[in-house]
Image: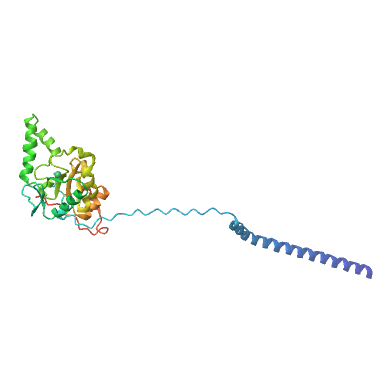
Amino acid sequence: MSASRKAKRRRSSRLGIRVLAVFLVLGAVAALLSFAFRRLRPEQAEARAASAPVATPVPTPVPTPVPTPALPAVDVTSWELRLIDFDHPLGEEFVPESLTDVGDGQQMDYRVAPMFLKLAEDARAAGYGVYVCSGYRDYATQHLIYFDNHVDVYIAQGMSEEEANAKARLAVNFPGTSEHQSGLCVDVLEYAGQDMEPYIGGSGLMLWLEQHCAEYGFVIRYPNGKTDITGVEYEPWHLRYVGDEAARYMMEHGLCLEEFLDLYKDASPAATPVPTPVPTPVG
Ligand SMILES: [Zn+2]
């Protein structure tokens, strides 16, 4: 091999190395660019996301907590919450401890009379007449009303004793089962001799009583639509004292006394600091 051919071969070999080096460098640059591009993409995506108009994220709806109204901490075995009905009679012997005059020749238990007198005073101040047509009624009077004024009259009209009793029970409590014997209730009208029937729509004094009686510790004892529970037709004039807290709760939640007392049977001792109800003594 000649020297010139050797030199020529060395030149072409160096050229090949250079070309290879250039390719290597280009490849490396391409790899770097590709790597950098891949690294950038998420950031660019984020940047695009940040600059794009973004819909306000919809917050996960958190259910509004429904406040469970706490039962009033009352003693359901206390005298003012005593349930008196056909199944829970006061009995023939029951007489209130002491009675106080509340007007129109009527009386109430001395412990509730002041609250009723205040109610009557405020109702009159609001523009209504208040006539106390019936307060405390003793067993003998209830007996007379039930038998002489109803059962006997119906029998005289030709009804059987059973039929007469059934009809009487719709209008009058059986002797010994009337709340009126407790002295804790009162029937009020706007004036003497007023017919009670028109009140079955709720108007005048009856509406005022519905709205305000609880402020004095009274409830409408036989509310509209509760006859199935109370066993007595709607009587918007019949006010029963149950105490301030119980009255407010019952009127606010539309409960009759039976329903209110049932809440304490269901309540767990941990949830409410209320003593376990003791069955009402049947006298
Ligand atoms: Zn009554």
Please state the horizontal and vertical placement of residue 98, each as a whole percent of the image: 8, 54
> For ligand 1, which image quadrant applies?
top left
Q: Is residue 85 visible?
A: no
Name the residue located 21 percent from the left edge and 39 percent from the top edge.
200
The relative height of residue 15 versus residue 224 in the rendered view (above or below) is below
Count of residue discs: 0
Q: Is residue 174 left or right of residue 20?
A: left
Q: Is residue 195 left or right of residue 71?
A: left
Please state the horizontal and vertical placement of residue 192, each as a whole percent of the image: 13, 41
Name the residue located 73 percent from the left edge and 61 percent from the top edge.
30
Q: Nearer the viewer, residue 171 or 280?
A: 171
Q: Is residue 61 left or right of residue 167?
A: right
Splitting the image into 4 quarters, where does residue 207 fall?
A: top left
Please state the horizontal and vertical placement of residue 185, each as a whole percent of the image: 14, 48
Please state the horizontal and vertical placement of residue 202, each as a whole percent of the image: 23, 41
Q: Nearer the viewer, residue 271 or 57?
A: 57
Name the residue located 5 percent from the left edge and 37 percent from the top edge.
148
Name the residue located 17 percent from the left edge and 51 percent from the top edge.
121
Q: Is residue 222 left or right of residue 283?
A: right
